[in-house]
Image (cartoon, rainbow, N blue to C red):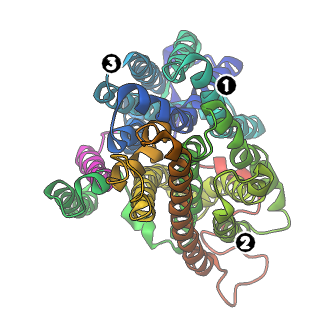
């Protein structure tokens, strides 16, 4: 990506630039994983349905993914510092309104606004960083950039758990709003830049892509509630297909498309993109729904649930660096394929999950998944931009990140729907001997547990002497429902491993030491070549 500083503001302040952008990007993954820990408290306070509660996470993730490429194009046109500032205002304002939200509708809408701001600040922030640093210093700066994102992912649940348990769920949104305001005060010191070659934003592509993604997520989230054959759900899926086809037609006619569909002809680019499945389907749903399981089935606090999740997220901080060093001896494509099958094994192993299970029993499978995801964090971005021609590296990076974020949004919705369906199936017929309105409504109980709430259902059981047995039966059904989800995700990763291994394999007859066009990197440094 070409980056030209504006003449009136060509003074680089690398220290302040790095501080401002790293402080900002650490908030964005925290806003996803942290909010998931707060969902049970939000549901208890606002009395929302599962579908409405899912939009607290999905609404943010949806706009974060949908506006990533559009905000990057706008930043190239009008100046990256301006878009960074607007992004911070939208993110901070959305977070503040979330903290003050009187009902779930206001909260969901505010989270969607915050996601737009996060997209704008992420794309413009990375471009500002690339302009402020050169050579090896740029590689180190982007290393800290990636570490900051990892910190948000790794400690988001723990921080949110501490805040929720001690200050209430609203503090999970208030604290990022305050930090965003502090960073906004630093932005006048940042140098501005823009891309002089940029001419326009792909509005048709942006609109059709975002609306298609919105309709898909709407159908997936509302399916378990309204029924998969309901007009709302079927209409959402039909609209998604129509808009997706329209998006493909629009992009082929654009001179500067949002998505360069020609990149899909690159075998290794497709393979690397598919290799994100362990992250989006194997890691993100666990970060969102495991806290609810621990709170409902084991009766732990939000703070304890966040701390337990460090067994999954903590290792993602260290293994990106290890993956970079390991490319000196193990080719990137081998490591990438290995992370996919490693995730599949970890997900299958995690079916040891049961109410009251010891944490040492959970540590090996959670750590295995965390290691696999951490390795992929250190490899996939660099592999994506290195799998195509240098001239198309910027577009490849944008497409890759948009697909990954969109995939996370879809994965959260799909996993939530499957978890509710599996749990509902397990609950049905097992609570007939209890006197409670939830015994006759397994869907309501499954939705309640998926939000981390079981106590209120137990309190409806009469006589009170049966409440313990009801709680044990419901918690066991929730665990079995989680097993069903884990087996589906493990099977998906296993199939993905075969496909990725075939796509990333070196062709027969390749000359040793002579990289083919689009070959993947042996070092992690090429990850920043697109800058």
- Percent across and percent down for residue 175 are 56, 17
Judge whether 462 appears above or below 338 on screen: above
Please name which of the two marks, 1 or 2, marks the residue nearer to the observer: 2
Label 3, residues with CA under 10 Å away: few <14, some 14-19, many ≥20: few
Real-space CA distance between mark 2 and mark 3, rounded to the nearest whole angstrom: 50 Å
Question: For residue 334, which numbered disc appears in the image?
Answer: 2
Real-space CA distance between mark 3 and mark 1, rounded to the nearest whole angstrom: 36 Å
Question: For residue 120, which numbered disc appears in the image?
Answer: none
Mark 1 or mark 2, which has the lower sequence index? Answer: 1
Judge whether 328 appears above or below 197 on screen: below
Quarter in which the C terminus is drawn: top right
In this orientation, does residue 458 appear? yes
- Percent across and percent down for residue 333 are 69, 70
Q: Residue at x 45, y 58 (%)?
A: 419
Q: Residue at x 58, y 56 (%)?
A: 279
Do the CB atoms of the residues marked 2 and 3 lie less than 8 Å apart? Answer: no
Question: For residue 102, which numbered disc appears in the image?
Answer: 3
Read off the magenta span: 199-221
Q: Residue at x 78, y 58 (%)?
A: 364
Q: Which residue is mark 1?
A: 18
């Amino acid at each position: 990506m070409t980056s030209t500083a504006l003449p009136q503001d060509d003074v680089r302040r690398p220290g302040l630039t790095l501080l401002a952008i790293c402080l900002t990007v650490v908030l964005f993954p925290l806003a996803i994983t942290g909010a998931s820990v707060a969902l049970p408290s939000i549901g208890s306070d606002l009395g929302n349905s599962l579908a409405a509660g899912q939009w607290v996470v999905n609404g943010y993730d949806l706009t974060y993914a949908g506006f990533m490429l559009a905000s990057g194009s706008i930043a190239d046109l009008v100046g990256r510092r301006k878009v960074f500032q607007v992004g911070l205002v939208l993110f901070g304002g959305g977070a503040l309104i979330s903290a003050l939200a009187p009902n779930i509708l206001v909260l969901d809408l505010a989270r969607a606004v915050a996601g737009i701001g996060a997209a704008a600040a992420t794309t413009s922030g990375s471009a500002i960083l690339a302009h402020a640093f050169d050579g090896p210093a740029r590689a180190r700066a982007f290393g800290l950039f990636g570490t900051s994102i990892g910190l948000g992912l790794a400690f988001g649940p723990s921080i949110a758990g501490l805040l929720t348990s001690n200050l209430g769920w609203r503090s999970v949104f208030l604290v990022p709003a305050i930090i965003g305001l502090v960073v906004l005060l630093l932005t006048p010191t940042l140098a501005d830049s823009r891309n002089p070659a940029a001419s326009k934003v792909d509005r048709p592509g942006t609109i059709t892509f975002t609306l298609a993604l919105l309709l898909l997520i709407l159908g997936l989230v509302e399916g378990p509630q309204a029924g998969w054959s309901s007009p709302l759900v079927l209409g959402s899926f039909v609209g998604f297909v129509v808009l997706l086809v329209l998006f493909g037609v629009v992009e082929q006619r654009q001179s500067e498309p949002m998505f360069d569909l020609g990149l899909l002809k690159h075998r290794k680019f497709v393979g690397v993109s598919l290799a994100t499945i362990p992250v989006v389907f194997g890691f993100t749903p666990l970060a969102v729904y495991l806290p609810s399981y621990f709170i409902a089935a084991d009766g732990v606090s939000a703070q304890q649930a966040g701390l337990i999740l460090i067994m999954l997220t903590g290792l993602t901080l260290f293994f990106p660096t290890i993956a970079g060093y390991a490319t000196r001896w193990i080719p990137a494509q081998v490591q990438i394929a290995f992370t996919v099958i490693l995730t599949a094994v970890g997900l299958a192993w995690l079916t040891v999950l049961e109410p009251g299970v010891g944490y040492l029993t959970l540590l090996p499978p959670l750590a295995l998944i965390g290691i696999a995801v951490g390795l992929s964090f250190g490899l996939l971005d660099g592999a994506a931009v290195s799998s195509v021609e240098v001239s198309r590296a910027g577009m490849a990076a944008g497409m890759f990140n948009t697909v990954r974020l969109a995939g996370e949004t879809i994965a959260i919705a799909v996993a939530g729907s499957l978890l509710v369906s599996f749990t509902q199936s397990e609950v049905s017929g097992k609570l007939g001997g209890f006197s409670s309105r939830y015994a006759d409504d397994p869907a309501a109980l499954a939705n309640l547990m998926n939000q981390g709430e079981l106590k209120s259902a137990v309190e409806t059981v009469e006589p009170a002497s049966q409440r313990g047995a009801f709680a044990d039966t419901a918690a066991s059904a929730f665990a079995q429902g989680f097993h069903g989800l884990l087996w589906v995700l493990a099977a998906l990763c296993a199939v993905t491993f075969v496909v990725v291994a075939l796509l990333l394999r070196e062709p027969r007859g390749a000359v040793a030491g002579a990289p083919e066009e689009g070959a993947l990197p042996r070092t992690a440094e090429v990850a920043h070549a697109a800058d």
